[in-house]
Amino acid sequence: MRAVLFLTVVGLAGCAKKREPAPADLEEIAAFMFRVWEDEATLEGGMQNLAPLLEANVDSDEAEEGWILTPLSAEAISGVDTNLEDPQLDLLLGAAVAARSPFTLEEHAATLVLQDQVFSNPTNYAAYDRDVWEGDSGTFPPGDTPLIRTRNDVETQNFGVTVPYILLKDYRWIRARGIEDAVIGRAWIEDVGCSPGGGNCLMQSWSIDLFYRDASTGGTIRFTSTWSQIESSLNDVISERVRLAALANGMHQVFESSDEWLAEGGLD
């Protein structure tokens, strides 16, 4: 009987699905995490590779200026529900940034279920209304609600031009080996969003947003990667390098505005 049990266990182990290894390069791992986001075990493997890279580089010039990302593949976005028809992924600009926050992971997680998200960048957002349609809309502590899915009615404003769009954004708690807790979000737009005159359009946008405990300070390390395509008359006069810098600056603005809002007692 003991021999039969042993053979059964060995047979089950041999049939178990082998976890896909995560990339070891920071520029590639964000695209990997976007693709495998629904596979929690594989996503944890990505987090295990990403955490030491961030800890070694979070205070570097690159984290401030932004890393240029590996392009997204059609396979990477195949698992999300969107109305975008045949998005031209070769036209995406991708960048990622990282920074430390003095606020705890639990404080950042509590902001994710708030209906009004304008606080995260009031200079850029004219409106940002969040509906938590799956998971607990009142709280998001580790262990209690492992996953929330949100639908967001967003309106950005720049130089007097407004662009409305629907953003779908999901968050999940994970606990990878050697990492106490982390929240990883994945976002994309439902459809093309254009200004009223049609001259400025957000054609596509995909992102990964990460929060995890900063063991050295007790605060949080944040990492955001975004791939986007914006159609504007300014594209012909602004270089790709400048547009990438603007993309990185916009992500840092979210970090800074969120910290300012928390410092002012936004959760009280």
Image (cartoon, grey):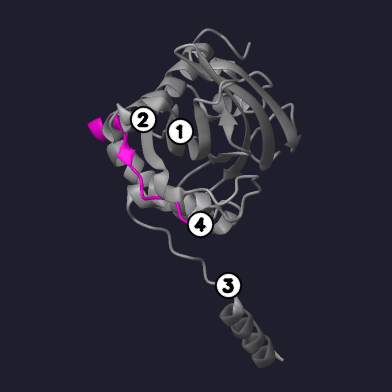
> Label 2: which residue?
235
The amino acid type of the residue labelled 1 equals Ile
Along the line of sight, which residue is nearer the eye, 179 or 222?
222
Q: Position of residue 133 (x, y in %)?
A: 75, 35
Mark earlier in primary sequence (4, 1): 4
Of the two numbered discs 3 and 1 on the same chain, state the one appearing first in sequence.
3
Give the quadrant of residue 128. top right
Alpha-carbon distance for marks 2 and 3? 46 Å
Q: Is residue 162 left or right of residue 1?
A: left
Residue bearing mark 3: 17
Asked whether residue 177 appears in the rendered view, the answer is no
Circle 3: residue type: Lys
Horizontal relation, residue 136 to residue 243: left or right = right
Q: Disc 2 residue type? A: Asn
> The magenta stretch spans which residues?
58-75
Front of the two marks 1 and 2: 2
Residue drawn at (72%, 28%), measured in percent from left and top?
131
CA distance separating discs 3 and 1: 39 Å
Residue 66 inside the magenta-drawn segment: yes
Instruction: Residue under label 4, please give it.
Output: 74
Residue that mark 1 sits on: 230
Label 4 to label 1: alpha-carbon separation? 19 Å
